[in-house]
Amino acid sequence: MSESMSGLRSRRLWFVWLAVFAAVVAPLVTYQVGQRNAQAKPEPAVCVAGDPIISCQLDDGWTVGLSPDVLRNGSSGVDGEGRPACLKPGDRIRTTVWVIPVEVDGMRWRHVLRVEC
């Protein structure tokens, strides 16, 4: 009977280690993989601000529009959302926008997540 108790303890210990791995190690590994493979990336752009539309020409030829609720980056990081102060109607500036590629039913576009001023 002591042999079967020993086997039972071994299985329990194995399940405990598996649970620890699933609860702690797996999320950390997943986070690191996600950080390395994040799809949103900074792209240099020339933005022209209309009223109300802002369009940005990316260096690779794509033209993207900025949503009125785009995140703004200032010197201290993300500092709010809405029309960036550096893009008043009529302004034309060289800046960086963070975009994420999107594809739905064969239609592709790049969604702007953030703009740096």
Image (tube, rainbow, N blue to C red):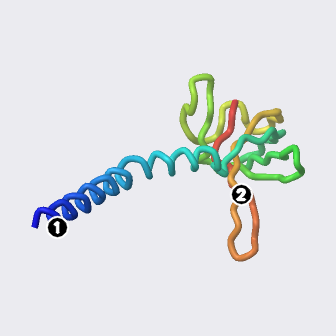
Q: Please give the name of the residue rendered at 34% of the width and 57% of the height, measured from the top-left corner.
A: 18
**Tag 1 residue:** 4
Q: Please give the name of the residue rendered at 84% of the width and 53% of the height, measured from the top-left corner.
A: 62
Q: Is residue 75 depicted above or below 81 in this figure?
A: above
Q: Please give the name of the residue rendered at 28% of the width and 59% of the height, measured from the top-left corner.
A: 15
Give the number of the disc on residue 101: 2
Q: Residues within 10 Å of mark 1 (few under 14, many from 20)?
A: few
Q: Please give the name of the residue rendered at 75% of the width and 46% of the height, measured from the top-left corner.
A: 54
What percent of the width, then of the height, locates residue 90? 80, 37
What percent of the width, then of the height, locates residue 27? 44, 50
Disc 2 from disc 1: Cα separation:
56 Å
Residue 36 image-quadrant placement: top right
Circle 2 or circle 1, nearest the eye = 1
- Position of the N terminus by quadrant: bottom left
Type of the residue with mark 2: Pro
> Furthest residue to the top?
75
- Position of the C terminus by quadrant: top right
Q: Is residue 9 left or right of residue 107?
A: left
What percent of the width, then of the height, locates residue 89? 75, 39
What percent of the width, then of the height, locates residue 70? 62, 45
Number of marks present in the image shown: 2
Type of the residue with mark 1: Ser
29 or 9, which is in the foreground?
9
